[in-house]
Image: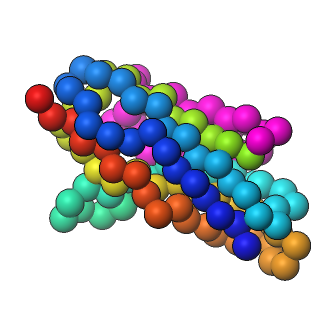
Amino acid sequence: QVQLMESGGGLVQPGGSLRLSCAASGNIRRIIAMAWYRQAPAKERELVARLTSGGETDVADSVKDRFTISGDSANNTMYLQMNSLQPEDTAAYYCNCRADTDYSLYGDYWGKGTWVTVSS
């Protein structure tokens, strides 16, 4: 019912930057919040940053000084600007969307993920 298209991942050197994008489409009536999660090999998935429809943000302490979440509500798109990337940021980054659709309320939707690799 909601499709999430992530882009912007790739290989970057330590200290570099990347910008992830996530575009939501489908039978969306209302987006409640969008978020980025990440999962490194052999680790649990963790919240990186969340953006609510009201503009409130929640960013993990481990990236608070380096990552910025933003959104374009007119286009149902969310961004994650990642600066000063470090090897420990290497992970698959997943877009999450909580939304009301034509068929369900407060649904939870996930993208397929985009890999970010930080290495020299």
Residue 39 appears left or right of 72 = left
Residue 17 appears left or right of 11 = right
Q: Going by the picture, which residue comes out furthest to the bottom?
A: 103
Q: Going by the picture, which residue comes out furthest to the left?
A: 120
Locate the C terminus by quadrant.
top left
Q: Please tell me whether residue 51 belongs to the stretch shown in magenta.
A: yes
- Above or below residue 101? Residue 55 is above
Please tell me in which quadrant of the rendered image residue 55 appears.
Answer: top right
Q: Is residue 24 visible?
A: yes
Residue at 22 percent across and 36 percent down: it is 118
Estimate the x, y position of residue 26 in percent, counting from the top left: 76, 64
Q: Is residue 35 visible?
A: no
Residue 51 appears left or right of 25 = left
Color encoding of the figure: rainbow
Q: Which residues are magenta?
A: 47-75
Residues 30 and 61: in front is 30
- Above or below residue 86? Residue 6 is below
Residues 60 and 94: in front is 94
- Above or below residue 69? Residue 9 is below
Residue at 40 percent across and 29 percent down: it is 18
Estimate the x, y position of residue 22 in percent, counting from the top left: 58, 47
Residue 11 appears left or right of 65 = left
Residues 100 and 8: in front is 8
Residue at 47 percent across and 31 percent down: it is 19
Estimate the x, y position of residue 115 in percent, counting from the top left: 33, 50
Q: How many marks?
A: 0
Locate the N terminus by quadrant.
bottom right
Residues 43 and 92: in front is 92
- Above or below residue 91? Residue 111 is below
Q: Please tell me whether residue 56 belongs to the stretch shown in magenta.
A: yes
Please tell me in which quadrant of the rendered image residue 52 appears.
Answer: top right
